[in-house]
Image: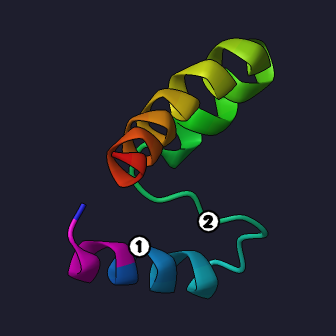
Amino acid sequence: MNAGKMVRYAIKGLEKDRFEILPGQSSALKLMSRVAPQFMLNQMSKTVNKLLAQTKS
């Protein structure tokens, strides 16, 4: 999602007085982290581990 779309989504959420604004795939990520927290932690850690391996070498 580009920055312009995200800002429009956030402004709409603020106008509707939403407690939590989840743009793009954030709502799916939140749901999956509640259903299978360890699985989602492992999936999200893969990207971080790759970046760390690149910085160490």
* Numbered circle sitting on residue 9: 1
- Residue 24 drawn in magenta: no
The one nearer the camera, 52 or 21, is 52
Which residue appears at 35% of the width and 81% of the height?
A: 8
Q: Residues within 10 Å of mark 1 (few under 14, many from 20)?
A: some
- Bounds of the magenta span? 2-6
Marked residue nearer the N-terminal end (1 or 2):
1
- Rendered-image quadrant of the C terminus: top left
Image quarter (top left, top right, bottom left or bottom right) of the N terminus: bottom left
- Label 2 crowd (10 A; few <14 / some 14-19 / many >=20): some
Judging by the rendered image, the residue that carries numbered circle 2 is: 21
Residue drawn where x is 57% and y is 35% of the image: 29
Which residue type carries mark 2? Answer: Ile
Q: Which of 12 and 51 is in front in this view?
A: 51
Where in the figure is residue 55, as x and y percent of width and height? Answer: 38, 54
Q: Are marks 1 and 2 in contact (CB under 8 Å)?
A: yes
Q: In which quarter of the image is residue 35?
A: top right
CA distance for labels 1 and 2: 8 Å
User: In the image, what residue occupies the spot 79% across and 24% down?
Assistant: 34
